[in-house]
Amino acid sequence: MLHRFHLRTNERSQMIDITEQVRSTLRQAGALEGLVIVYCPHTTAGITINEGADPDVARDILQHLNELFPWNHPQYRHGEGNSAAHLKASVIGTSQSIPFVEGKMVLGTWQSIFFCEFDGPRQRTFFVKVVL
Ligand code: ZN
């Protein structure tokens, strides 16, 4: 079964911790061992895993991505005007796969799963698939 989640972002660039949604999906599935896939069906958003304990880490990631991919660049050609968001989405990627053992994701102490918005605010979707 594919679990669908909706979320509303409220900034242009934003990292939202979705670890608990993934964890509760896995709990409901009741599976002991396998892989959980977190996927977003967007071209200007992504999924990543990084430190969730200190919010400054997410802020530094977003700020540095802004420096690497400025919103306006004379060589962007994409007419919609959001090429920076597309570039960031490709660098971050659309999914993450996390192994789980004894019903628990094998995440490091400081690791959290983030939905990354690069062209908000918008209504967004992500999916969680438990693979046995
Ligand atoms: Zn676009």
Image (cartoon, helix red, strand yellow):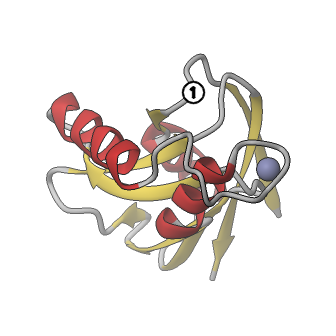
In percent of width and height, residue 66 lies at: 39, 43
In the image: residue 13, left or right of residue 111? right
Disc 1 packing (10 Å; few <14; some 14–19; many ≥20): few
Which amino acid type is marked by label 1?
A: Arg
Q: Residue furthest front?
A: 74
The residue under the point 48% across, 63% down is 92
Per the image, the residue denoted by label 1 is 12
The residue under the point 70% across, 44% down is 82
In percent of width and height, residue 127 lies at: 73, 54
Total marks shown come to 1
Seen from the viewer's position, the closer of residues 37 and 31 is 37
In the image: residue 36, left or right of residue 100? right
Task: Reply above or below: 112 against 56.
Answer: below
Task: Identify the secondary structure beneath mark 1.
Answer: loop
Task: Reply above or below: 71 against 100.
Answer: above
Seen from the viewer's position, the closer of residues 26 and 36 is 36
In percent of width and height, residue 83 lies at: 67, 53
Label 1 CB less than 8 angstroms from ligand 1: no
Task: Give residue 39's quadrant in the image.
Answer: bottom right
In the image: residue 53, left or right of residue 38? left
Q: Quadrant of the N terminus?
A: bottom right
In percent of width and height, residue 36 lies at: 56, 69
The residue under the point 54% across, 49% down is 22
Task: Give residue 132's quadrant in the image.
Answer: bottom right
The residue under the point 55% across, 20% down is 11
Seen from the viewer's position, the closer of residues 123 and 105 is 123
In the image: residue 40, left or right of residue 90? right
Seen from the viewer's position, the closer of residues 30 and 74 is 74
